[in-house]
Amino acid sequence: MKKFIYGFMLSMPLFTLWFCTSSSAGKDKQPVLQNKQSPSMKSGFKNIAVLELFTSQGCSSCPPADKLLGSYASKENVIVLSFHVDYWNRLGWKDPFSSKEYTQRQYNYSTALNSSVYTPQLVINGQSEMVGSDESKISNTIKKIQSQQAVAHLSIKNVQLENGRVNINFAASGNIDNSVLNVALVAKKITTDIKAGENGGVTLTNYNVVNNFKTIHQFNTGDNTIDIDIPSGIDLKNISVVLFLQQKANNKILAADQAAL
C-alpha cells in the first residue's frame, strides 16, 4: 500500500495532513432537450444520494475510487460529482481539472465532519466521509440514505445555451428554508493520458468531473431560473448540469437533480 503524507499551512487557520491512500475532478440561442426523467423525477420524493469524490490525477491511489464512482454514475437516485483538488499538482503532474475552490470545499467538509483531508475522499450527502474506494461502506451508506423519506424536492424543467451560459429552469418544493442551491457543470466522462507524476504513463478515466461550480443563496419555492458560465474549450455534448440543495447549518443535502445538455 502506497501512502504519501505531507502538511503545510494554507491561508485558512486549519493545519492538517494530506495523504493518498489505497486502503480502505455560441451567441445564438440553442434549445436543449428537457431533462429526461431525472432521478428525482422518477422517484418522487425519495432521497437522492449525492456522492462528492475529492480526487486528483496526481494521486496513485485515486484511480480505483474514480472507477468506483463511475459505476454509480448511471444508477437511479444517485448523483456523482468528481472534485479535483490542487495540492497534488506540485508532484509533477498538474491536474487540468483541479481547483483551489474544490480544495477549499474539501477543507470545509473536514472542519464540519472533524476528519482528515486526503485523497481519495468521498463525502455522501454532506454527512458521511470515507475512503473513496471503500465499496462496502459506500454501498451501505447509499442504501441507508435511499431508505429515508426526502423532505425537499428539486426538478430541472429545461436547460438552454445562450451567450456562453447555461440557463436552467427548475422547480423547488418542500422544506427548503435555510438552504443554499449548489450548481455544478460536469463533464460526464473524460479520458486523459497522464505524462508525469505518480500516475505517469497511465491512461485515466474520470466521471462527472466538475468544470464549474457556484452556490446560489436566494431562490424560491416553485419555479426558478438561474445560469452558470460555460468554460472555454468544453465539449457541450459531454456536459451535464447538477443541482442540489444543502442546508447551511450542517451541510446536509436535501434534494438533487441532474440533466444532460
Image (cartoon, grey):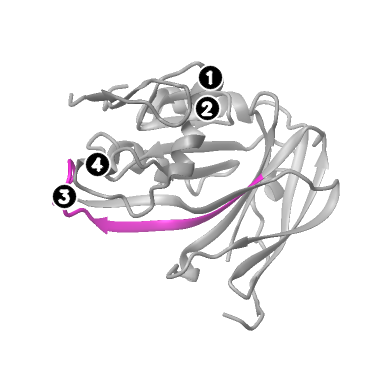
Image quarter of the C terminus:
bottom right
Quick check: 42 above or below 161? above
Residue 209: % across, % down? 44, 51
Residue under label 4: 90
Mark 3 nearby-residue class (10 Å; few <14, some 14–19, many ≥20): some
Amino acid found under the numbered disc labelled 4? Arg
Residue at the location (24% across, 41% down)?
90
Q: Nearer the viewer, residue 131 or 44?
A: 131
Amino acid found under the numbered disc labelled 3? Ala
Q: Quadrant of residue 254?
A: top right
Sooner in the amino-acid sequence: mark 1 or mark 4: 4
Residue 77 belongs to magenta span: no
* Contact (Cβ within 8 Å) of mark 1 with mark 2: yes
Residue under label 1: 113
Q: CA distance from mark 3 to mark 2?
A: 29 Å
Quick check: 36 above or below 57? below
**Dominant SS in magenta:** strand
Left or right of residue 178: residue 185 = left
Residue under label 3: 196
Residue at the location (61% across, 27% down)?
145
Amino acid found under the numbered disc labelled 1? Leu
Mark 1 nearby-residue class (10 Å; few <14, some 14–19, many ≥20): some
Residue stretch in magenta = 182-201
Q: Nearer the viewer, residue 43 or 259?
A: 259
Q: Quadrant of residue 16?
A: top left
